[in-house]
Image (cartoon, rainbow, N blue to C red):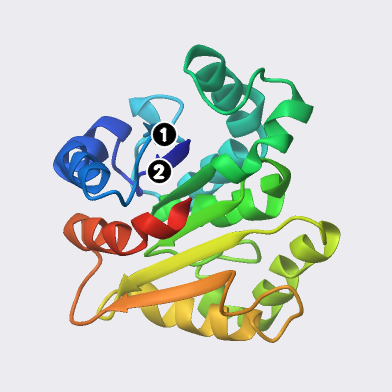
Amino acid sequence: MLYFLHGSGDSATGFYENSHYKQVLDKLAKQGKLQNTLVVFPTFYPSQAFVTGDYQKDDKLSRFFARTELMGALVPKVEAKYSTYAKSTTKKELQQTRAHRAIGGFSMGAITSWYVFEEQLPYFKTFVTLGGDSWVIQEDGGGTATKQTAKKLAQTPKKYPDLDFKILAGAGSRDPAAELLQKQIKEMKKYRGFNDTDLKYYELPGAHHTLEVTVTLFEHYAKQIF
């Protein structure tokens, strides 16, 4: 199972359709890079009325989604309906099948995924963070509060030393998020629990903060998600 989130001001349907993910996922499946995988495109907006383009308001919704809605409502509902590795939706079963569950997203969706890493590591093994740093300390914290952000994120593997994970981060080289991610990831690797195997960063030369770039980054990492 892969849960993949859109960015600020977008919608689950718009992100899925405008990025042509159906065609992309079909192609990846045929290439053997992402087979037998259900992909869910959720949203952190309670309704369209919450779409304002205000990043601070989005951040509050993003945090709430990661901390409460994702495991409190979305995952149990989805995995009770569809055939997955989880035989039930009990906490124990969902934790035991975490290796078959990933979450990721673009821009605010990536920021949300960083929150999920901090909050829900027992339920997810892989995190695909494209075009977005961690705001766990403050907005754009990967670059503006780099040391504090890395230190806070390092508490997660320390809290769950027996849980392996993969963070697959990426951005276009001309995306403002690229510098933030570079600084954050470099600082994270100073801490025990993060290394080149479980924390990766890929930068697409000359690329900006666009849906098209997100698709290319997603394709780059597709085979590594599971």
**Mark toward the start of the polypeptide (1 vs 2):** 2
Q: Residue at x 73, y 44 (%)?
A: 122
Q: Residue at x 49, y 19 (%)?
A: 83
Residue 98 as seen in the image, left or right of residue 211: right
* Amino acid on which the number 2 mark rests in the picture: Leu
Residue 71 as seen in the image, left or right of residue 16: right
14 up-or-down from 150: above or below: above
Q: Secondary structure at mark 2?
A: strand
- Residue lying furthest top: 81
Q: Depth check: 66 or 32 in front?
A: 32
Q: CB under 8 Å between callouts 1 and 2?
A: yes
139 up-or-down from 150: above or below: above
Name the residue beneath numbered marker 1: 43
* Amino acid on which the number 1 mark rests in the picture: Thr
Q: Residue at x 37, y 57 (%)?
A: 223
Q: Which mark is residue 54?
A: none
Mark 2: few, some, or many residues within 10 Å (few <14, many ≥20)? many
171 up-or-down from 144: above or below: above
Residue 133 picture location, percent across and down: 49, 67
Name the residue beneath numbered marker 2: 5
Residue 48 picture location, percent across and down: 33, 27
24 up-or-down from 142: above or below: above
Mark 1: few, some, or many residues within 10 Å (few <14, many ≥20)? many
Residue 3 as seen in the image, left or right of residue 146: left
Is residue 152 visible in the rendered image? The answer is yes
Residue 65 picture location, percent across and down: 57, 37
